[in-house]
Amino acid sequence: MPELPDLEYLVPRLRGLLEGQTLERMEVFEPVVLRNLLGHDIDNVLPLGFQTVTRHGPFVVLDLGPSSEIQLSIIIHPMLAGRFSTAKRKKSTMLRLHLAQGHLDYDDDKKMGKVYLARPEQRPEIPGFAKQGLDILSSEFTEQRFMAVAQKLRSQVRVFLMDQSRLSAIGNAYADEILFEAGIHPKTRMNSLKEDDLRRLYRALRSVIEGAIEIIRQAQPAMEAKYRQHMKVRNRKDQPCTRCGSKIRRANVLGYDAFFCPVCQPDGGKGFIDWSSLEK
Ligand SMILES: [Zn+2]
């Protein structure tokens, strides 16, 4: 669930909850999500105080230690379904951080996310941590950099948007919203997009993500909630397009559901991949 706008809302919430608090103990209910790189049990170094809570691409980074140095990082990659909660333990609760006051749970009903325990120098050992794509919210995300990353690719545009090695923390929901905003069909091949199309895609990336961050901030949903009310095409099959009134369609693309408006995001052209003919 957490995509970039969700994480931008979540991380300050976690910061408010954790900074200044002490981690007393970690209780693991589902070992499959845990990757301990420390070489010893976490209990050997606890209790420790939370120093900072930050986002690194799609990872949530909890740094612990005495104030002068970080001794331990709990680095969480929530993938599709990871959530944080201070509520009661659920079937999907994978582990619990026992704080001096209260607790924080990591829930994941798909068990796809990962929780890494690492010292600072071990971060490069975490898969995908060192090599992240462009972060849309960083100052590096200029039109020039985007054009360089986006050019001459054979992949289809929706796959490109979700490729974490090129762009960081865009998933299914925002990929659909960004393509709707840009007026580009999800199955269009990257190398068939003209320069104007790419510039439109760049602007859509910025405006959709920045707009969503603001909307979620104002709505103040619960930390574990999935806030999607503002979406214009995602999960809106057969509902009227907000721009032209046509029915929103859903297409199954290599196992992923893509939602789009067939009028505002026309297909065709030489870059279009006809999946219906490939699936036969
Ligand atoms: Zn439309």
Image: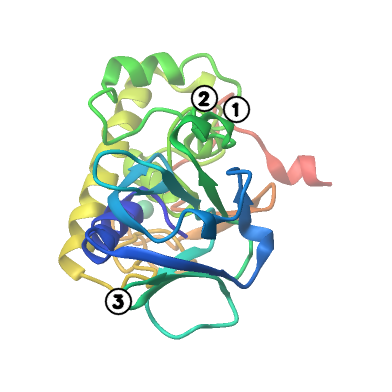
Spatial CA span between label 1 and label 3: 49 Å
Farthest residue, direction front: 44
Q: Residue at x 20, y 69 (%)?
A: 219
Residue 239, compared with residue 260, is above or below; it is below
Q: Which residue position is annotated with label 1?
A: 155
Report whether 35 appears left or right of 103: right
> Hey, which residue is sitting farthest right in the picture?
280
Inspect the image, locate mark 3, and give the three-letter code of the amino acid beneath it: Gln
Q: Amino acid at mark 1?
A: Ser
Q: Which residue is mark 2?
A: 190
Residue 73 visible to an observer of this rendering: yes
Quick one: label 3, few (<14), some, or many (20+) residues within 10 Å? Answer: few
Q: Secondary structure at mark 3?
A: loop
Mark 3 or mark 2, earlier in chain: 3
Of marks 1 and 3, which one's residue comes earlier in the chain? Answer: 3
Q: Are marks 1 and 3 in contact (CB under 8 Å)?
A: no
Q: Amino acid at mark 2?
A: Met
Whichever of callouts 1 and 2 sits on the residue coming sooner in the sequence is 1
The percent position of residue 221, horizontal first and vertical second, equals 27, 72
Instruction: Give neighbour class at mark 2: few <14, some 14-19, many 20+ (Cα, 10 Å).
Output: many
Q: Could you give the CA–CA distance between mark 3 and mark 2, rounded to whole angstroms?
A: 51 Å
Q: Which residue is mark 3?
A: 101
Is residue 105 positioned above or below 252 on the image? Answer: below
- Please identify the quarter of the rendering in which residue 143 is found: top left
Residue at image x 51%, y 40%?
A: 162
Q: Identify the image quadrant of residue 189.
A: top right
Q: Label 1's element?
A: loop
Q: CA distance from mark 1 to mark 2?
A: 6 Å
Estimate the x, y position of residue 271 in percent, counting from the top left.
Answer: 57, 26
Can you tell which quarter of the image residue 127 is in?
top right
